[in-house]
Amino acid sequence: MSDEPSGDDQIGEAPLENIELPQGALITQSKTYKVVDRLGEGGFGKVYKVFDPIMNRYAALKMIKTNVPEDERRRFRQEARLCGTFMHPNLIRTLEVGTTQEHGLFWFA
């Protein structure tokens, strides 16, 4: 008999089928986009062509500039939310939102 604990005996681990997410649990995203090219720049944001290796697809990622006033930041976040509600072939749709790990800059793709 081995003295090493089996996977079932390890403290803090539960079989995956027993894991339940309680109501109100927060799911954090950890997706990584690879920047391919800069597509353009506007008054308060820059747009990049990015590659999503998990979904194996390209997307456009819009990131707010660092020197933008708070009211413009609110408009940027509102734009991200509104783009997430559209379902039309001629309009973009927000896939995901987040902040950059390095500088905390808000973005959406």
Image: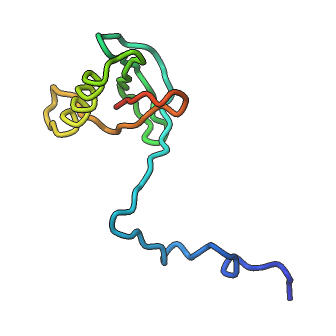
Residue 18, percent across and down?
Answer: 48, 78
Q: Quadrant of residue 96?
A: top left
Identify the residue shown where x is 82% and y is 78%. 4
Image spot of residue 49 (x, y percent) = 40, 21
Write down the quadrant of residue 46 in the picture: top left
On-image quarter of the N terminus: bottom right
The answer to whether residue 83 is above or below residue 41 is: below
| Residue 80 or residue 31, whichever sits in front | 80
Seen in the image, is 4 located left or right of residue 77?
A: right
Left-right relation of 108 to 4? left
* Above or below, 24 relative to 28: below
Residue lying at the far bottom in this picture: please name it: 1
**Location of residue 79 with respect to 8 vertically, above or below:** above
Residue 16: x and y, percent? 52, 72
- Image point 31% across, 38% down: which residue? 95
Quadrant of the image for the C terminus? Answer: top left
Instruction: Answer with left or right where residue 20 lies relative to residue 109.
Output: right
Q: Observer-nearest residue: 66 or 47?
A: 66
Residue drawn 38% across and 70% down?
22
> How many numbered dots are placed on residues in this image?
0
Front residue of this view, candidates 34 and 58 = 34
Image-quadrant location for residue 42 = top left
Please say which color scheme the image uses.
Answer: rainbow
Name the residue at the front extreme: 70
Report the front residue among 32 and 54. Answer: 32
Which residue is rendered at x = 70% and y = 81% of the image?
9
